[in-house]
Image (tube, helix red, strand yellow):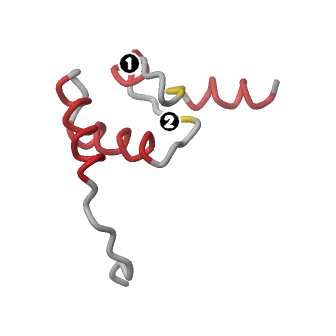
């Protein structure tokens, strides 16, 4: 097994965003993933997690895989 070859420094912005999302009821690991997606300016966050799908955030479009496929096919 190969180890990761690149180190990425922790970002205070991502940590703060993660904590903001945790306070809104999103689980820690999910909040970290979502914060990273927002920080890197992803257009979509694709998930099957019902709690995250109900969360609205103007910085990113949160969508289910099926809805994403339908949307992209239009």
Outermost residue to the front: 13
Specify the label residue 55 is tagged with: 1
Q: Do labels 2 and 1 touch, CB within 8 Å? A: no
What is the x, y in percent for residue 62?
A: 50, 27
* Residue carrying label 2: 45
* Residue in the picture at 22% in, 40% down: 16
Residues packed near mark 1 inside 10 Å, few (<14), some (14 to 19) or many (20 plus) = few
Which quarter of the picture shows residue 24?
top left
Q: Quadrant of the C terminus?
A: top right
Q: Nearer the viewer, residue 55 or 8?
A: 8
* Residue in the picture at 58% in, 37% down: 43
Which quarter of the picture shows residue 3?
bottom left
**Element at badge 2?**
strand
* Residue in the picture at 25% in, 43% down: 29
Which quarter of the picture shows residue 38?
top left
**Mark toward the start of the polypeptide (2 vs 1):** 2
**Element at badge 1?**
loop
Outermost residue to the right: 74
Q: CA distance from mark 2 to mark 1?
A: 11 Å
Examine the rendered structure and indicate whether residue 5 appears above or below residue 55.
below
What is the x, y in percent for residue 8?
A: 33, 69
Q: Nearer the viewer, residue 26 or 60?
A: 60
What is the x, y in percent for residue 63?
A: 54, 26
Residues packed near mark 2 inside 10 Å, few (<14), some (14 to 19) or many (20 plus) = some
Q: Quadrant of the N terminus?
A: bottom left
* Residue in the picture at 50% in, 36% down: 45
Residue 72 located left or right of residue 63 = right
Q: Nearer the viewer, residue 49 or 40?
A: 40
Q: Nearer the viewer, residue 39 or 37?
A: 39
What is the x, y in percent for residue 10?
A: 25, 60
Examine the rendered structure and indicate whether residue 43 appears above or below residue 2.
above
């Amino acid at each position: 097994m190969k180890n990761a070859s690149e180190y990425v420094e922790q970002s205070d912005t991502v940590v703060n965003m993660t904590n903001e999302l945790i306070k809104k009821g999103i689980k820690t690991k999910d909040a970290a993933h979502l914060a990273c997606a927002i920080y890197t300016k992803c257009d979509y966050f694709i998930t099957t997690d019902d709690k995250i799908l109900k969360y609205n955030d103007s910085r990113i479009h949160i969508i289910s895989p099926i809805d994403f496929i339908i949307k992209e096919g239009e």
